[in-house]
Structure formats: structure tokens, C-alpha cells
Amino acid sequence: MFSFTDRFDRLTSGPMTLQIIEKVPAGPDGLPFYFYDILTGGQPVGKISIRVGGNFHTYYNGNIGYEVDEPHRGHGYAQAACRMVLPVARYHGMAALYLTCAEGNIASRRTIEHLGAEFLETCPVPREYFAWREGMERQRIYRLAI
């Protein structure tokens, strides 16, 4: 049975801090996840989540989701934040993560590739995937061994 821990409520590396916003239990098709603010110098610059475990949807949605606010893009914040949440995955017994991005999202593609993830494929999302109805773009799928 899955259980959240308070051990990762605040993660710090140099000037960057990840501060927990909420811990979300698994939903019908989802996985439990930790959701953080990304802060640099105490100022918010974006958000990141780490989904624990794996299921059909993880392959297309990935285990990590991040967004960096537009004025703060291009500084490597997403990559640094991704590295900072890896201990969360390890703590919960994960040996690898799926990382995904829309085919046309060059910035996310670079972030994922700089993390050292292995490219698996580019594919359309299947009709069974919950976001298919939203017209989700083809996804680049990567696997990151941790």
C-alpha cells in the first residue's frame, strides 16, 4: 500500500528550493503524486510534480510533469527540479521513470535529453488515454534509469 512521506516536503539544492504544495492520492486512472512550487532565491518560477508508480497512462503522461513560468524559462530550472525529485522516486522503490513531451516542445525535449533519458519513440496517444479527447499532440517518450 502506498504511503506519502513528509521527508520530501522541502528539497533544496543551491539557490533552488522545491516546496510541497500538496500530496495527491491516486485517482481512478491516476497515480499518487507530490506537487511542488519551484523557487529560486525564494521567488516562485514554476511547478513540478512527481507521479509515483506506473500504469498505462504514465507511458504517455510521464512520471514527472513540470512548467516554468515564461519570464523564467531558459535558465535550466526544469532540469534542476527534475534532478531534485529523483530521490522521491527512489524512496518509493522506483528504478526508472518515463518522461514525455509533446513532439513540438523543443525546450522540454532538451530538458529530458540533458537528464540523460533514453529516447524510446514518438507516438500518437491512443484513444484509451484520458487526454486523447483533448487533442493531445504526438508524444516523445523517454525512459530515465535512476
Image: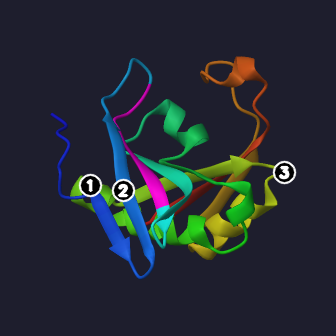
Element type where label 3 sits in the image: loop
Query: In front: 32, or 58?
Result: 32
In-image side of 65 versus 95 (left or right): right
- Counting residues from the start of the chain, the first of labels 3 and 2 encountered is 2
Amino acid type, callout 3 = Gly
- The answer to whether residue 117 of the structure is visible from this angle is no
Residue 135 inside the magenta-drawn segment:
no
In-image side of 76 versus 80 (left or right): right
Magenta-drawn segment: 30-38
- The residue wearing badge 1 is 9
| Corner quadrant of residue 77 | bottom right
Label drawn at residue 117:
none
Of badges 1 and 3, nearer the viewer stands 1
* Principal secondary structure, stretch drawn in magenta: strand
Q: Where is residue 101 shown, x and y percent of the image?
A: 69, 50
State how far apart marks 3 and 2 are (Cα).
Answer: 30 Å
- Residue at figure coordinates x 80%, y 49% from the top left: 103
Query: In front: 79, or 114?
Result: 79
Q: Are marks 2 and 1 in contact (CB under 8 Å)?
A: yes
- The answer to whether residue 75 of the structure is visible from this angle is yes
In-image side of 39 versus 114 (left or right): left
- Counting residues from the start of the chain, the first of labels 2 and 1 encountered is 1
- The residue wearing badge 3 is 104
Amino acid type, callout 2 = Gln
Amino acid type, callout 1 = Asp
